[in-house]
């Protein structure tokens, strides 16, 4: 029998991270820094673990291997991998200026999917900003020269950010999350990142962190990025709540929901649902069995489960294919 499943996220202690995910979002860890929480992941670099129900203690990847592709939905039937990786990112410091390859380059050169992603700004300190592409179109020669002489930041598009902002980071877009920003990220299931500039920082081994200049030169789109997002909402999917479509592309659909009371949802045959609570608490009920989803927790709802009820006062993100 299909059931919603709470997930326990693997945590990452990258040097630029902070402790908000521990202190405010309930992530339990002995790590001093929790930079990222991989809320929904079947990637070998960090596997989500089921934390409720009949499959508690199994990795989500193991469950899906046993359950078959039907629980991912019809939109995933042509894929031999789990399609999404979803994270919280707590940037206490600046992340490196970086770029991700598209599918064609990544599969050819790395044997892995590329990475298109979207960011929802959960919170941001006053005057926080991020890098989103270039101020204007530049040549490959100028890009390479500015990397070499450390003037790259002069031509990057620096954007102020506020809680609730959304950014669509298409593969090939130069980008960097700035300090003081808490991000919810939905991306292709890929861990490919090409660093272009890293402020001269060193890693745990005391050596400068690796840059990937040649690969970045090969994949970066040297222009002002064009945002891509949807502008319609499936009313039948979201009755009785305030809903906002954040982004839509061939890889994912992402919504922000705000519930004050009750609503009925439906996980159809087309796609699974992934819900993460940003504020408040949700109760998710199927056939009189309820699951409590607290702030900072994520639940996987298999495709084909059908109707389920949400109750509570909460803000949440829903992702699907």
Image: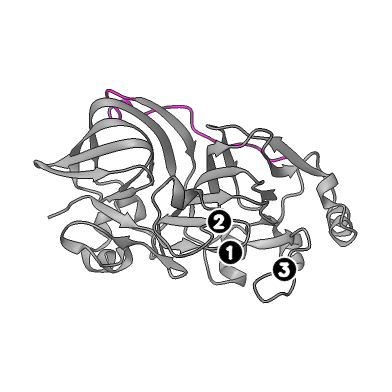
Of residues 140 and 91, the one drawn nearer to the viewer in this rendering: 91
Q: Nearer the viewer, mark 1 or mark 3?
A: 3
Secondary structure under the numbered disc 3 in the rendered image: loop
In the rendered structure, which disc, 2 or 1, sits on the residue that comes first in sequence? 2
Residue drawn at x 48%, y 27% as measured from the top left: 231
Which residue is the site of mark 3?
202
Q: How busy is the neighbourhood of tag 2: few (under 14 within 10 Å), some, or many (20 plus)?
A: many
Image quadrant where residue 106 sits: bottom right
Residue 226 magenta-highlighted:
yes
Q: Is residue 186 visible?
A: no
> Which of the 4 image quadrants contains residue 278?
top left
Which residue is pictured at 37% across the width and 59% down the height? 78
Which one is nearer the viewer's eye here, 139 or 196? 196
Tag 2 and tag 1, C-beta contact below 8 Å? yes
Query: Relative to residue 40, is residue 226 drawn left or right?
Result: right
Report x, y in % for residue 162: 60, 32
Q: Is residue 230 above or below residue 18?
A: above
Q: Position of residue 277 (x, y in %)?
A: 36, 41
Q: CA distance from mark 2 to mark 1?
A: 7 Å
Magenta span: helix, strand or loop, mainly? loop
Q: Nearer the viewer, mark 3 or mark 2?
A: 3
Q: Nearer the viewer, residue 209 or 317?
A: 209
Compare marks 1 and 3 and give the one earlier in the sequence: 1
Question: Which stretch is magenta?
Answer: 224-241
How far separated are the C-alphas under marks 1 and 3?
20 Å
Left or right: 117 as drawn, with respect to 81: right
The residue to which callout 2 is attached is 115
- Are there few (<14), some (14-19), or many (20+) residues within 10 Å of tag 3? few
- Identify the residue position indicated by label 1 in the image: 192
Mark 3–mark 2 contact, CB under 8 Å? no
How crowded is the residue under tag 1: few (<14 C-alpha within 10 Å), some, or many (20+)?
some
Q: Which mark is residue 205?
A: none
């Amino acid at each position: 029998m299909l059931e919603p499943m709470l997930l326990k996220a693997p945590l990452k202690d990258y040097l630029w991270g902070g402790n908000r995910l521990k202190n405010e979002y309930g992530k339990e860890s002995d790590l001093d820094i929790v930079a990222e929480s991989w809320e929904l992941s079947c990637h070998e670099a960090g596997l989500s673990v089921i934390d409720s129900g009949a499959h508690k203690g199994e990795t989500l990847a193991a469950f899906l291997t046993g359950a078959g592709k039907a629980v991912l939905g019809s939109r995933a039937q042509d894929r031999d991998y789990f399609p999404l990786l979803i994270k919280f990112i707590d940037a206490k410091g600046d992340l490196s200026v970086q770029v991700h390859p598209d599918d064609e380059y990544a599969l050819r050169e790395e044997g892995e999917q590329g990475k298109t992603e979207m960011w929802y700004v959960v919170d941001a300190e006053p005057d926080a900003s991020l890098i989103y592409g270039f101020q204007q179109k530049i040549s490959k020669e100028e890009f390479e020269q500015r990397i070499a002489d450390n003037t790259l930041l002069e031509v990057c598009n620096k954007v102020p950010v506020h809680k609730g902002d959304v950014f669509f980071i298409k593969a090939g877009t130069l980008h960097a999350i700035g300090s003081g920003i808490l991000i919810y990220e939905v991306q292709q299931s890929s861990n490919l990142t090409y660093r272009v500039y890293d402020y001269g920082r060193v890693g745990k081994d005391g050596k400068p962190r690796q840059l990937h200049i040649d690969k970045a030169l090969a994949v970066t789109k040297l222009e002002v990025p064009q945002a891509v997002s949807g502008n319609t909402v499936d009313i039948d999917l979201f009755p009785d709540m305030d809903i906002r479509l954040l982004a839509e592309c061939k890889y994912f659909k992402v919504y922000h929901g705000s519930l004050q009371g009750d609503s009925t949802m439906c996980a159809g045959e087309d796609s699974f649902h992934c819900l993460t609570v940003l504020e408040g608490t949700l109760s998710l009920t199927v056939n009189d069995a309820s699951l409590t989803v607290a702030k900072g927790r994520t639940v996987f709802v298999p495709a084909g489960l059908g109707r389920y009820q949400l109750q509570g006062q909460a803000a949440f993100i829903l992702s699907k294919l």
